[in-house]
Image (spheres, rainbow, N blue to C red):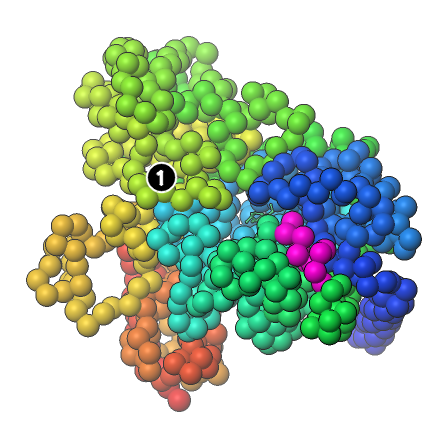
Amino acid sequence: MKKITFSLLFVISSFISFSQQKTVSQKVNALLKQMTLEEKIGQLNQYTGNNQATGPITINPNKETEIKTGLIGSMLNVIGTKYTRQYQELAMQSRLKIPLLFGQDVIHGFKTTFPIPLAEAASWDLEAMELSARIAAVEASASGIHWTFAPMVDISRDPRWGRVMEGAGEDTYLGSKIAYARVKGFQGNLGDVNSVMACVKHFAAYGAAVGGRDYNSVDMSERMLWETYLPPFKSALDAGAATFMNSFNDINGIPATGNKYLQRDILKGKWNFQGFVVSDWGSIGEMVNHGYSKDNKEAALQAITAGSDMDMESNAYRYHLAELVKENKVPIALIDDAVKRILRKKFELGLFDNPYKYSNPEREQAALNNSEHRKVARDIAAKSIVLLKNDKNILPLSKDTKTIAFIGPLVKEHKQNMGFWAVELPELDYDKQVVSQWEGVQNKVSSSTKLLYAKGCEIEGDNKDGFAEAIAVANQADVVVLSIGERADMSGEAKSRSNIHLPGVQEELVKAIQATGKPVVVLINAGRPLVFNWTADTISAIAYTWWLGSEAGNAIADVLFGDYNPSGKLPMSFPREEGQIPIYYNHFNTGRPAKNDTEINYVSAYTDLKNSPRFPFGYGLSYTTFEYSDLKLSKNKIKSAEKMEVSLNVKNSGKVAGEEVVQLYLRDKVGSVVRPIIELKDFQKIKLNAGETKVVKFIIDKEKLSFYNAALEWITEPGDFDLMIGSSSADIRLKETFELVK
Ligand code: GLC
């Protein structure tokens, strides 16, 4: 009986949703029929407001008039229920009363700021990342925002590129899982008032800019594009992403914004994407700079033809599309398709029913001062910290330590902890809203602990006048904690750096403090992997604290004093020197692989530097230890259509509870194209009490065994595979071989 009821309910609900879908399409088509060509083009037009400048602003003094006459369909950088309502009221004066869409770069939190995305990626905690995005959506949507320009899913193997801070690092599998989680978090049940549309960016391969120089050209094989850079976009689409944003770069000679292959053949064709594509800030007009368009008019033609639906800030559509239609150079069908994609989202968000649905001041007030959100931010911040070294087990420190010297240019900073792409809110008092590292330690230690401070030096510059005071303070302490790194605005958009060593004289400060003979802990704050070889060689305890957001100080103190046992794992390889870049773990073997870090004769190696990274992908220590054993495969031969179960035991062999990211890697030994020496294919983050053992299971299926061959077919090929279980890509604990048979 139950079964019949369920299936009946299912039929009824799918009919209702189908009829609703039919209703949305009908409404879109009915509205489209009423629109003039100018009004249609207005929907393809997006301008910035004044709350933030996230690109070179085009001055358009007529914005308000154009909104009232239906010539602008969306705004970005308009924040708050007050301002969004004001602009929406202008839109409601237009002939057809089509509501505006408000977009914003809500990249890692809104009022509550979470760790930068690269830091969150280091947590390998997909649920935590989804929750972080969910809270960002709750806060942003309470402030009138309908749409976030996130997640950024660009794979990057080059820490010189400042925007690595915004993504999930170098690995396609991890990046794809994180992309999915973040879209689910932002969108929730899209159409609910506490959800925002996601915008998957930057389509595509923006992270492969030559030289790690932002906005620079990208040139790669189609196979590399499909195998490494596209999967996170497809994963985000599978999660239901409502919109995409294209990228500034040219790729294989064609700017992404005018790239039919990317936007029409792949995204809207093969992947059947039903949402809309927004250009990146001015990228349509920038095709003139690229030398791909002779002028803005040609850029408009090329962009709309290639599938760029909405023009952010370039004016190209505003001033040229109508003319192009009248000259029969742009079929009205292309305009209509773009307009319908955008209108569909406005209907689905419920904006036609209530244009002010998201501009509710009471909801804004309640959502923005929420201690629950800060608790979540503190939790994921602690999980994002990567313990790089802990020789002599200096860490965790005792809360009763008699005297602690806390030294460095970032110790007492507040706003720096937010990192790049934090939302600038006028009401944010950073000194109160962000817990500094100093305050975090103050909150943690016992009343009897004496905390000493010295800045030591600035982040940049060669002034060492502060060293003497820092040394004097260190000499009075039982332990010294140093907090050093970049400035928050040294990574992010347009923040590529040729030199990613610790800036200024900070490493000399570390040396001077180390010379006191006191136990030293170094915290490194950055939005990218940095180079710090002397520190890495010499200092016993090092933690990478990235930029951790509103609760940075408390999260760092939780780890420093052992209230949270660090569990982070690096989402990017850390180079020894810039000369190694691009450096990534899943590289090919070459015909002359070096057997180790010292072999250099007639092998693929540097004669002046080790080949291996300073710290490898997937690496991170804990205050406890984990033992791996009993690796079992359910079969040692598998047909491509079959599944194989993998199981192993993981034991917490230390004295404190902790979390471990158990990583499963494969190596396809021989292929019709060369295959990486190792590839992440699954992982599980598990919590184990001291002495506890858990059985960890994975499934190997066809998807995990497949790759793109030279003909770009997604296939499997028979042959031997190494299956490796590791605590990092360079710390393989268990290994088995199995055969894939026809
Ligand atoms: C910027 C960024 C993009 C951002 C957009 C709007 O230039 O490239 O990621 O979403 O403009 O601020």
Q: Quadrant of the N terminus?
A: bottom right
**Which residue is rendered at x = 67% and y = 52% of the image?**
315
Tell me if residue 64 is in the magenta stretch: no
Q: Residue at x 76, y 30 (%)?
A: 365
Q: State the image quarter where residue 32 is shown.
A: bottom right
For the C terminus, the image quarter is: bottom left
In the structure shown, which secondary structural element does the residue marked by tag 1 occupy? Answer: strand
- The answer to which of 592 and 556 lies nearer the viewer is 592
The residue lying furthest to the left in this view is: 601
Q: Is residue 445 above or below residue 100?
A: above
Q: Is residue 666 above or below residue 98?
A: below
**Left-right relation of 507 to 172:** left
**Can residue 54 be seen in this snapshot?**
yes
Compare residues 541 and 585 and report the one nearer the observer. Answer: 585
Q: Position of residue 196 (x, y in %)?
A: 70, 50
Q: Amino acid at mark 1?
A: Leu
Q: Nearer the viewer, residue 406 or 532?
A: 532
Image quarter of residue 680: bottom left
Label 1 Cα neighbours within 10 Å, binned few <14 / some 14-19 / many ≥20: many
| Residue 184 shows in this picture | no
**Residue 311 inside the magenta-drawn segment:** yes
Q: Position of residue 2 (x, y in %)?
A: 82, 72
Q: Which residue is mark 1?
A: 387
Looking at the rendering, the stretch of residues picked out in magenta corresponds to 310-321
Q: Position of residue 400 (x, y in %)?
A: 39, 17
Q: Find residue 357 and report its horizontal and vertical position in percent.
A: 83, 45
- Is 677 placed left or right of 689 in the picture? left
